Amino acid sequence: MNSLRIEKEYEPFSNSKLALQFDQSDEKDTESTPLLTNISVEVEGYHSIERLDSDSLSESDSIEVQLTSSESSNQKKALVLFALFSFIQSSAFVDWNPIENSVLSAFKSWTETTVSWQANVAILPSILLQWPLCWILQKFKLSTVIKFMGVLPLCLATIARLLPLLALENPGEVFKTLVFISSFSIGVIGVIFYSSLSKFSSIYFGSAAMTLPTGIAMLFSNIGIVFSSVIGPYIVEDPSFSIPDEEKILQAEIRNYLLLYAVIIGTLSIVIIFTFPDPIYVGQVNQSPSIGDNIYKIMKNKDVTLLLSTYALSSVPIYWSSTFLPIYFERYHFGQEIVGGLMSASVVISGFITVVTTKLVDSRKVEIRNSEHTIEYKRVNNGTTL
């Protein structure tokens, strides 16, 4: 009985070896190919092992490595929690936008320039800190970065900006300062989220199936925008400029609005921090020696380029809703509820396009993977080759 063992890297299980064990019968038959009596498939670091008899394997057949129930459960749990992280960071990023007119009326020291700079401060980290944050994601465990550099700071930032409204009679400049600090912090968290998207999908789902989880995460990000667009105008009314003590009334409504955010984000943060799982397999490390090398590889990979294009298209509603839409439409007597509806509609359309696009990309990559890992064997002298 001759035996041939072949080990190779197998996607989507990056850094895990696929071992194929071929056992060949000693019987010689010049009229036919060698008889493969047993084929073993083992993926290093995984529990699932598949064994096939030669009778069930054609000359051009493929072997699929199935996930065990614990591995599949780990993937689903990680995706749900990452989607919740996506939801809360996106919602917090745009929570001021649907109520801009009310904020200007509630706080007389605020101007359109103040609102503009609040939005700019949230976007600045994507310009200033993109590279160092990518380095951190490359060097440290993803789950740790998400929990303690993403979720926990987001929770603290949403609580910090609420405190002056709860504790001070005239929050004034203290409130404005904390809003700017929290906006910058939320902007940093947004960079962490978007920079970790592809890494999350890759290490939990493998590169052959990473696009759909990415699309789902982006969908929840868009749902977060819808949440702000609907809840904001519902809790905080449009300024009427005719009600006595309207300034105090609007401040109270804004306080309740931010309190709701603090409760929701605080609750979900506790769940994510204490339950976010690590990948069930070990040894997952970044193979690229540098960020520059990553960028070079990305530019050469058409699938990754398409994936990044999906990110970009999905981000359009975020930046669109970060402009002066409520302030601009107020000039034409459109209330904040109408503007929130427009934001929600654009986000729903974007989310639909995202899911459809990512599903198509994954389908194409599965076809490529199956063609690349099809087992073809033939007789070469007295040996067997793959």
Image (cartoon, grey):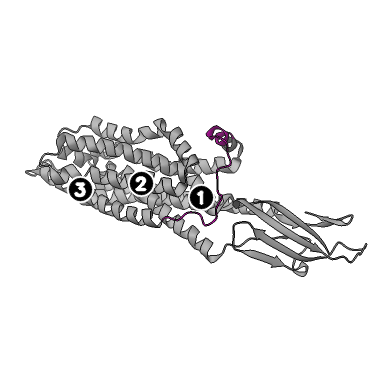
Element carrying mark 1: helix
At label 1, counting other C-alpha atoms closer than 10 Å, the crowd grade (few under 14, some 14-19, many 20 or more) is: many
Residue 3 appears in which quarter of the rendering? Answer: bottom right
Residues at marks 2 and 3 touching, judged by CB atoms closer than 8 Å: no
**On the picture, is 348 further left or further right than 96?**
right
Residue at 26% across, 53% down: 263
Disc 3 marks which residue? 236
**On the picture, is 31 further left or further right than 268?**
right
Q: Amino acid at mark 1?
A: Ser
How far apart, in angstroms, are the residues tagged by discs 2 and 1?
18 Å
How far apart, in angstroms, are the residues tagged by discs 2 and 3?
21 Å
Image position, residue 38 (x, y; %): 76, 66
For the N terminus, the quadrant is: bottom right
Which is more toward the observer, 168 or 228? 168
Residue 318 appears in which quarter of the rendering? Answer: top left
Of tags 1 and 3, which is closer to the observer? 1
Residue 352 is inside the magenta segment: no
Q: Amino acid at mark 3?
A: Val
Q: Amino acid at mark 2?
A: Gln
Disc 1 marks which residue? 201
Q: Which residues are magenta?
A: 276-296
Of tags 2 and 3, which is closer to the observer? 2
Residue at 50% across, 46% down: 199
Element carrying mark 3: loop
Q: Which numbered disc covers residue 89?
A: 2
Mark 2 or 1, nearer chain start: 2
Residue at 47% across, 49% down: 354
